[in-house]
């Protein structure tokens, strides 16, 4: 149960308190107030220990406002005295107190190596670590928790597939289909792999609406295709790919599909069984969890057929001088002592997100993302990349953009220095995409469920001021 | 130290008095372009191309810096550091850098080639590095980012005309004061473009030193 102390609500009077047991509407948060008993005795109706009054509900508090108190880091001022406006969530997310407390608690109370120890601390650490694995499995609806391999991050998870599945399954002239919009982590491992195996990368480009050309992707698939690697949500274009369809097409040609879900798992419901993917990767630090842990989802039968990636302790069954036998997945791919506390922290993050509800988070972000897009679009000289939002096109809650005549790094520097607004500028680990779009770099503002409309307003105001400042020098 | 260290001082852009005068290039018709003068000996080595940078955009300040002799790189660095230290507000440092960006000499289009690009930067930077006949380093730079251009102008002011050894020995930490707060100097990341530019200047200077050392035994 999360407490809502510190939530600042504009309430006309004490008598207009929201019934904590009543959900106002689907998109608002169920607010729980901890009030001392003496207060509740002055309420006009119910004699229950909680304050509950039958009065019209006040305006629902947005998800951003209601969750902000859980993120201490957001309540700070930057050196120049401005309040921090954090809009770099696609790079990494902030962590709620529950996650920080879970990691702290692990180190304070039961830190111990997992899986081998007999003693009490080790048993507890193992339990919590494996519980975290179950939570990840449930979060993405994997059929069993052994389909979840903990890695350092999504990048390592992709490399695991490349060096384990890739090396043993790809032959010269086999094709790997990717899009030009992929993150470097979904391109470079395959380039390295193609040098070793002779497999070939085929790139799918974008449509005029600046989304990956799904039709071209379908046409690129052939019986030579062995693997399709695609993002679910683009960290630059904010576009969403129809993974279910793409997976079906891949399987129809006998290929496997790996989905980079780094920008989708934190923001929406992702069901791997429904999507039908063979591999899926994500990073904890983008979903309110600690850095240092991520995961690979792989269908059991595929993982079972894969040779080890890293060798060492935990992934073995028996070790002799001249050979070793290997453990079953997922242990087979988890050599050495894992990031135990961090995995437990990821589990706590999943608890936190699940309690809010991923659909609720997604709905809020669609609304806030559209608010960002519409307001940013109106700023003179701004061009936003990716598709325009519409009835049929959902954008992720991020905008990569450029301002005419102003380098994004100059823009981001001034926004930070003068206004405390944190956005990102550069390639966003997508140089091929930038080259395709004919630009060298872009700025990117990316939201998460703890951002508010006020954050967007602050950003737009700061952007206007920044553009004005640089224009005054021309 | 001269009066440049007071808080009200203005950082003087480099004047022609800092570079040794080149009497053969006195024509006014081409002041906006970089002038090249080929050295008489060893036409093979580009390291002997003499380069003079002219600064048409700035006005000769009424009272040039009070250097009794040509200032060393360290003296110039002190001037620069105190200049930026006198601007505690980031916005003022940004404004100063944007002003310096406007003073950067024009960079010829022919110089915007891949071999001149400073890699690892989020802004595009082109850098030309040559060694003149007297073993001094000459630099020209351009960028698509105005703040980067400002930093590069300062770097050039510090190091243009310096001995090759001085360029290579220059310590990066000293430039902390100029920082518009992007990242501390110690973090070498792609965002810290001007840090990469400095490294580029030093790397290519070292290459030219080795080239000129190696070329000596080849002279007939």
Image (spheres, rainbow, N blue to C red):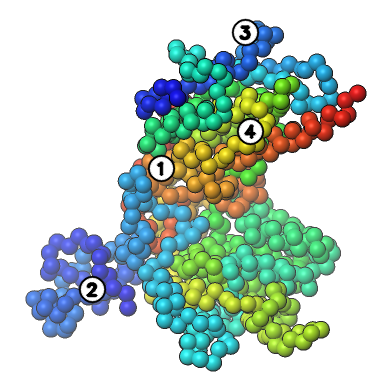
Please report whichever mark, 2 or 1, sits nearer to the chain's N-terminal start.
2
The structure residue drawn at horizontal position 32% and vertical position 46%, both measured from the top left corner, is A81
Disc number placed over residue A417 in the picture, else none: 1
* Residue in front for this viewpoint, B64 or A241: B64
Q: Which residue is mark 4?
A: B167
Q: Which residue is mark 2?
A: A33
Alpha carbons under labels 2 and 1: distance apart = 38 Å
- The reply to whether the C-beta atoms of the residues labelled 3 and 4 are less than 8 Å apart is no
- The reply to whether the C-beta atoms of the residues labelled 3 and 1 are less than 8 Å apart is no
Q: Secondary structure at mark 1?
A: helix
Image position, residue B121 (x, y; %): 60, 43
- The reply to whether the C-beta atoms of the residues labelled 2 and 1 are less than 8 Å apart is no
Alpha carbons under labels 4 and 2: distance apart = 64 Å
Q: Residue A2 is drawn in which quadrant?
A: bottom left
Q: Which residue is mark 3?
A: B28
Q: Residues within 10 Å of mark 2 (few under 14, many from 20)?
A: some
Can you tell which of label 4 and label 1 is closer to the viewer?
4
Q: Residue B152 is drawn in which quadrant?
A: top right
Alpha carbons under labels 3 and 1: distance apart = 42 Å
Q: Residues within 10 Å of mark 1 (few under 14, many from 20)?
A: many
The structure residue drawn at horizontal position 82% and vertical position 18%, both measured from the top left corner, is B41
Image position, residue A374 (x, y; %): 42, 48
Alpha carbons under labels 4 and 1: distance apart = 30 Å
Are the residues under badges 3 and 2 in a single subunit?
Answer: no
Are the residues under badges 3 and 1 in a single subunit?
Answer: no
Label 4: chain?
A: B
Left or right? Give the position of A437 relative to B57. Answer: right
Please report whichever mark, 3 or 4, sits nearer to the chain's N-terminal start.
3
């Amino acid at each position: 149960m999360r407490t809502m102390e510190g939530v600042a609500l504009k309430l006309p009077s004490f008598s207009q308190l929201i019934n904590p047991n009543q959900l106002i509407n689907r998109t608002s948060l169920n607010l729980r107030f901890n009030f001392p008993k003496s207060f509740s005795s002055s309420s006009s109706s119910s004699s229950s220990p909680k304050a509950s009054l039958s009065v019209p509900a006040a305006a629902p508090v947005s998800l951003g406002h209601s969750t902000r108190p859980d993120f201490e880091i957001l309540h700070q001022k930057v050196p120049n005295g401005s309040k921090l406006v954090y809009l770099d969530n696609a790079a990494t997310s902030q962590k709620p107190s529950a996650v920080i407390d879970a990691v702290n608690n692990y180190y304070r109370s039961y830190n111990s190596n997992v899986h081998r120890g007999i003693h009490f601390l080790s048993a507890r650490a193992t339990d919590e670590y494996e519980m975290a694995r179950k939570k990840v499995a449930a979060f993405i609806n994997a059929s069993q928790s052994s389909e979840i391999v903990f890695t350092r991050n999504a990048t390592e998870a992709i490399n695991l597939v490349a060096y384990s599945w890739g090396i043993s399954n790809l032959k010269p002239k086999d094709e790997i289909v990717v899009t030009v919009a992929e993150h470097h982590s979904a391109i470079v491992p395959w380039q390295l792999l193609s040098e070793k195996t002779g497999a070939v990368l085929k790139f799918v480009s974008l449509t005029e609406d600046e989304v990956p050309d799904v039709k071209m992707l379908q046409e690129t698939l052939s019986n030579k295709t062995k693997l399709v690697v695609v993002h679910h949500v683009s960290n630059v274009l904010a576009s969403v790919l129809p993974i279910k369809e793409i997976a079906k097409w891949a399987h129809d040609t006998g290929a496997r599909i790996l989905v980079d879900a780094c920008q989708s798992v934190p923001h929406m419901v992702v069901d791997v069984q429904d999507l039908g993917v063979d591999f899926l990767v994500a990073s904890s630090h983008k979903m309110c969890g600690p850095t240092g842990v991520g995961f690979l989802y792989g269908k059991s039968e595929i993982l079972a057929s894969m040779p080890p990636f890293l060798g060492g302790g935990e992934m073995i069954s028996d070790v002799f001088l001249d050979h070793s036998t290997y453990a079953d997945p997922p242990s087979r791919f988890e050599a050495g002592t894992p990031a135990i506390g961090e995995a437990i922290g990821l589990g706590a993050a999943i608890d936190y997100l699940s309690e809010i509800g991923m659909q609720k988070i997604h709905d809020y972000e669609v609304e806030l993302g559209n608010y960002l897009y519409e307001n940013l679009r109106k700023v003179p000289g701004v061009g936003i990349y990716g598709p325009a939002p519409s009835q049929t096109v959902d954008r992720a809650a991020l905008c990569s953009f450029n301002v005419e005549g102003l380098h994004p790094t100059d823009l981001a520097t001034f926004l930070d220095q003068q206004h405390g607004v944190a956005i990102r500028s550069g390639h966003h680990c997508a140089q091929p995409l930038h080259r395709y779009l004919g630009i060298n770099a872009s700025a990117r503002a990316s939201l998460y469920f703890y951002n508010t409309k006020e954050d967007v307003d602050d950003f737009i105001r700061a952007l206007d001021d920044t553009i004005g400042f640089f224009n005054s020098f021309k | 130290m001269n009066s440049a260290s007071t808080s009200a001082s203005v950082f003087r852009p480099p004047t022609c008095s800092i570079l040794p005068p080149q009497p053969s290039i006195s024509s006014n018709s081409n002041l906006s372009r970089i002038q090249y003068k080929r050295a008489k000996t060893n036409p093979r080595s580009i390291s002997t191309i003499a380069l003079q940078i002219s600064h048409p955009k700035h006005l000769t300040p009424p009272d040039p810096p009070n250097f009794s002799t040509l200032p060393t790189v360290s003296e110039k660095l002190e001037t620069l550091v105190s200049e930026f230290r006198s601007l505690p507000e980031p916005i003022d440092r940004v404004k100063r850098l944007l002003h310096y960006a406007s003073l950067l000499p024009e960079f010829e289009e022919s110089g915007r080639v891949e071999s001149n690009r400073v890699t690892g930067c989020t802004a595009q930077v082109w850098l030309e590095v040559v060694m003149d006949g007297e073993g001094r380093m000459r630099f020209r730079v351009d960028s698509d980012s105005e703040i980067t251009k400002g930093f590069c102008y300062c770097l050039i002011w510090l190091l243009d005309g310096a001995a090759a050894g001085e360029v290579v020995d220059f310590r990066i930490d000293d430039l902390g004061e100029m920082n518009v707060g992007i990242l501390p100097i110690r973090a070498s990341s792609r965002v810290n473009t001007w840090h990469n530019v400095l490294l580029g200047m030093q790397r290519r200077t070292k290459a030219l030193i080795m080239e000129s050392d190696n070329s000596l035994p080849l002279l007939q």
